[in-house]
Image (cartoon, rainbow, N blue to C red):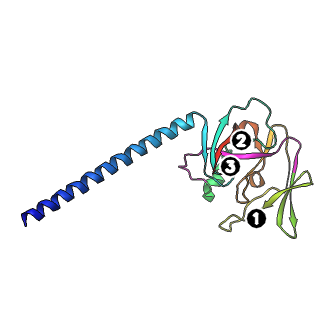
């Protein structure tokens, strides 16, 4: 009987030791990830987890030349838009992300309109010709969304758009000013 108790105690010790090793490994990995992510961000990389653009790793660059249609940019939403996104739950106040990333769809003098289509509901048009996709009048929780009806871009204003109909972008908040745009970004690895 004493032998069984001794065997159980040894088994418990091994179990305790293996759990301790597991937690030490887990703790080490978490520290590595946390410091690695900070290093990663300081080197100008962004991990995109939103559905606005393909999921993946993007490298940011200083803007040295004129921004053009198709460029991916990182920007800080203005106070009004940020408050709206927090109120709706699109962003959390405590989120690490203070910036958004979208693709430029319009530059100075471009005109955007939202028109009704019998087949697709609301459709975004650029310069009364090119259809850029749908515009939703409600978000995923069936709350009404403000959307632009008409917008002509002025100097240093950009129309930014995501790839998802559920992307909260210039279809809803309008033009983004040049001073709100921080970097250009290019995908390095997309999932």
Give the residue drawn at x 58%, y 33%: 43
Picture coordinates of residue 99, whole percent (x, y): 63, 44
* Quadrant of the drawing holding the N terminus: bottom left
Depth check, mark 3 against mark 2: the one in front is 2
Q: Is residue 176 left or right of residue 19?
A: right
Measuring from the top left, give residue 35's x and y in whole percent: 46, 38
Considering the numbered disc 2 on the image, is that residue within a helix, a strand or a loop?
strand
Q: Is residue 69 magenta?
A: no
Would you call the spot at circle 3 few (<14 residues within 10 Å), some (14-19), or many (20 or more)?
Answer: few
Please state if 13 lies on the left or on the right of 111 as rendered.
Answer: left
Find disc 3 in the rendering and name its residue: 80
For residue 137, which numbered disc appears in the image? 1
Say left or right for 18 vs 117. left
Q: CA distance from mark 2 to mark 1?
A: 25 Å
Q: Nearer the viewer, mark 2 or mark 1?
A: 2
Image: magenta residue range: 91-111
Residue 43's place in the image compared with 140, above or below, is above
- The overriding secondary structure of the stretch rendered in magenta is loop
Up/down of 142 relative to 53, above or below: below
Q: Badge 2, how many Cα within 10 Å: few under 14, some, many 20+?
A: many
- In the picture of the structure, the residue carrying the numbered disc 2 is 73
Q: Residue at x 67, y 65 (%)?
A: 140
């Amino acid at each position: 009987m004493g032998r069984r108790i001794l065997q159980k105690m040894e088994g418990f010790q091994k179990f305790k030791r293996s759990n301790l090793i597991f937690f030490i490994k887990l703790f080490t990995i978490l520290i590595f990830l946390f410091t690695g992510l900070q290093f990663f961000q300081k080197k100008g990389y962004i991990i995109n987890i939103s559905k606005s653009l393909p999921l993946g790793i993007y490298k940011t660059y200083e803007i040295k030349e004129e921004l053009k249609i198709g460029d991916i940019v990182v920007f800080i939403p203005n106070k009004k838009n940020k408050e709206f996104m927090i109120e709706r739950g699109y962003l959390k106040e405590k989120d690490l992300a203070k910036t958004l990333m979208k693709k430029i769809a319009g530059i100075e003098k471009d005109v955007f309109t939202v028109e009704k289509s019998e087949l697709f509901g609301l459709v975004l048009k650029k310069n009364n010709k090119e259809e850029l996709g749908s515009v939703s009048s409600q978000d995923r929780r069936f709350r009404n969304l403000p959307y632009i009806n008409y917008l002509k871009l002025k100097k240093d204003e950009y129309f930014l758009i995501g790839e998802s109909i559920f992307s909260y972008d210039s279809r809803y908040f309008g033009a983004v000013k040049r001073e709100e745009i921080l970097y250009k970004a290019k995908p390095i690895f997309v999932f």
